[in-house]
Amino acid sequence: MSAAEPATDREPWLLVVDAQRIFADPASDWASPFWEGAWERIRELAAAVGPERTLLTRWLPTADRSTAWGDYFAAWPFADVPATDPLYALVDGAAELSAHPTIDEPSFGKWGPQLAGVVGHAPQLLVTGVSTDCCVITTVLAAADAGAHVAVVADACAASAAENATAALHTMSLFPPQVDLRSTAEVLAGP
């Protein structure tokens, strides 16, 4: 796949879930120990797909505190800061990967009207990002349920812990043909 080739409806969109400092900075309580390796592969995939077909999401702390999100933020007070806090900024170099504005959501899963409005109702998605066992899995299952064809690029996802990655990837593997698991090398090698 070349960045110079024109995009078609059957060409995949690269979805980079929550490449934010709160999940990447080792000083954060939510940092993934696998972020650096995943980030290297995300950049490779983005270079192959190109900025017109790459989308970035951000999880923002804007959920209604009168719901269960209030309990969530009470449990994680370090994250209960304004959405403009540097914790919620994209990691260095991420913004340059996409020609589109970020898709910001107050929920773990990023599939919804905003994302579907960009990629269409039955897209081909290559899903990467953090955390495999939270925002990635909830995005993948909702997108698949809505009719998207989803390839989880397992080695371009970063989990909270190795055992959580194994569990999340296993769970997502239970949803073929809507969801399949691939490696960066397999994606870059083509269909």
Image (cartoon, rainbow, N blue to C red):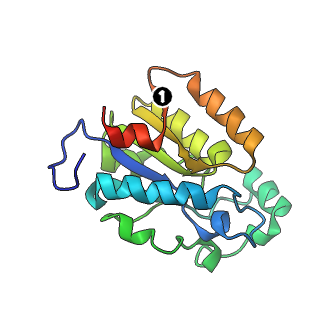
Location of mark 1 (residue):
180
Task: Give how far across and how far down residue 127 sits, in percent.
Answer: 47, 44
**Which residue occupies 70% across, 74% down?**
81
Local secondary structure at mark 1: strand
Q: Is residue 32 left or right of residue 47?
A: right
Task: Establish if 138 lies above or below 35.
Answer: above
Which residue is pictured at 43% across the width and 50% down the height?
A: 15
Tell me where residue 49 appears, x and y as whole percent: 30, 52
| Residue 187 x/y as whole percent | 38, 40
Residue 67 visible in this rendered orientation of the protein: no
Relative depth, front residue between 161 and 57: 161
When asked about the image quadrant of residue 38, the answer is: bottom right
User: On the picture, is 157 further left or further right than 115?
Assistant: right
Above or below residue 117? Residue 9 is above
Q: Is residue 174 above or below residue 74?
A: above
Which of the two residues, 27 or 64, is positioned nearer the viewer here?
A: 27
Seen at 30% across and 65% down, the residue is 99
